[in-house]
Amino acid sequence: MERHSLELKPIGIIHSPYKNTKEAPYQGYKSEEISQMEVFKEFEKALQDIEGFSHIIVIYWFHKSQGYHLLVKTPWDESLHGLFTTRSPHRPCPLGLTVAELVAREKNVLKVNGLDAIDGTPLLDVKSYIPSIDEMVVVKPGWLEGKLRKGRS
Amino acid sequence: MERHSLELKPIGIIHSPYKNTKEAPYQGYKSEEISQMEVFKEFEKALQDIEGFSHIIVIYWFHKSQGYHLLVKTPWDESLHGLFTTRSPHRPCPLGLTVAELVAREKNVLKVNGLDAIDGTPLLDVKSYIPSIDEMVVVKPGWLEGKLRKGRS
């Protein structure tokens, strides 16, 4: 049983127009601002050919998150929901996940659209977004039923 | 600059029919086996109403991953690709990500389909999968162009 602590070192840092959590968009509502993801120089080679991708998966650390509740209220409605059915930043493992649009690359810096991380957020991972494995036909959207905006791309 | 180490504690453990990395499906090919994600008892309440969701995002720790290369070969072709354009388990932050089908819940255990994590994998996070924010219309699939299987759900 792996209950001991695991250790991570960031691969970069996110420079964002959002200086604090109040300025960032609500969860579930995409940012329209450009953020700059600075991947540390020693990892630059791992970005080879990434400019060929229009979308990438970004995993980051909610560094302003402190503590969590097992039941939470979200912007979607007034009810309490199980934390693991939400995208709240306040989680036991404060990992953030966004599928972002890659707008441009300049050496070790990726300019992306759609990221709501705040300025100074530690960047943990970048992965290719692969529709054939990352997209699902959702037949049951849980408590989000009827609350989802349609037609987004 | 957040270059110091970050610490995580797993929220559970994944019991899988795949006992080692050789048995697990290739990256990009979905498992058809049922895995059991045991969420530790103290987090059970955070699963409230999760059975209403057909799909969930699962983040886990590639605990058998050792080291990494910045350029890697994948099952898709013979070329070397930038690590961050791939889904290789050998990464600076060994974080795995799968959108899995939630088949059933029994108290603190989630039975899921489509997870290729091996037995004993530390579970880090579970999030709701929200098509309106997690799905993108990919206009540039990078080096994966023409290599993607179509029509998966």
Image: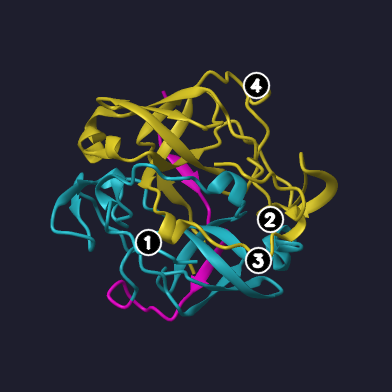
Chain colours: A cyan, B yellow
The kind of secondary structure the magenta stretch mainly shows is loop
The reply to whether discs 2 and 4 touch (Cβ–Cβ < 8 Å) is no
Q: Nearer the viewer, residue A137 or B133?
A: A137
Crowding near the residue tagged with mark 1, few <14, some 14–19, many ≥20 C-alpha atoms within 10 Å:
some
Which of the chains bears the disc numbered 1?
A: A
Residue found at the very far right of the displayed protein = B78
Residues beneath discs 2 and 3 located on the same chain: yes
Label 1 residue SS: loop
Q: Is residue B28 left or right of residue A31?
A: right
Which of the chains bears the disc numbered 2?
A: B
Which of the chains bears the disc numbered 3?
A: B
Disc 4 marks a residue whose amino acid type is Glu
Residue B36: x %, y % from top left: 41, 24
Residues beneath discs 4 and 3 located on the same chain: yes
Residue B1: x %, y % from top left: 49, 69
Inspect this view and state whether residue A3 appears.
Answer: no
Frontmost of labels 1 and 2 is: 2
Magenta stretch in the rendered image: A1-23
Instruction: Determine the CA span between mark 1 and mark 3.
Output: 32 Å
Q: Is residue A8 left or right of residue B42?
A: right
Label 2 residue SS: helix
Frontmost of labels 4 and 3 is: 3
> Compared to A11, does B63 lie above or below?
above
Kindly identify which residue carries mark 1.
A63
Label of residue B23 in the image: 4
